[in-house]
Image: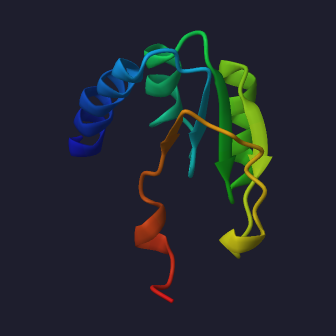
Amino acid sequence: MRSHRTIRCTLPRASELGSVGAVLALPSGHVRVTRHICAAFPNARVAVCDLDESGVTFCARQWDGEPISSQSDLSSLDPRGPYHVIWVGSLFTHVEPD
């Protein structure tokens, strides 16, 4: 529940940047973050990226997002930017420090 509160509090502050035309959710998961991003930036292009293809497919279909298949090696990922806001949630807890 704490992460939901963080998302709801943080995203509206990002809207203070002015016009936000593109947002990347990495990792997007299935629902947890993407729904809040779409609510905070209703006119933005939202790209959803995750290793879990079913989550990417669901979010892209549910919120008309741009699906991006992630890579285990993030250095080989093409996120198709640029983005005004990049939401990185629990990604760093799931990768090796190196």
- Establish if 43 lies above or below 65: above
Return the residue nearer the eye: 55 or 68: 68
- Establish if 72 lies above or below 50: below
Q: Would residue 23 appear left or right of 40 to someone viewing this image? A: right
Q: Decide if residue 55 is in sight here.
A: no
- Establish if 8 lies above or below 96: above
Q: x, y percentage for residue 48?
A: 66, 39
Within the image, what quadrant is residue 8 found in? top left
**Residue pictured at 67% horizontal, 48% vertical:** 49
- Establish if 40 lies above or below 47: above
**Residue pictured at 73% horizontal, 46% vertical:** 54
Q: Would residue 65 appear left or right of 94 to someone viewing this image? A: right
Within the image, what quadrant is residue 57 found in? top right
Within the image, what quadrant is residue 97 found in? bottom left
Q: x, y percentage for residue 11?
A: 36, 28
Q: x, y percentage for residue 55?
A: 66, 44
Return the residue nearer the eye: 42 or 33: 42
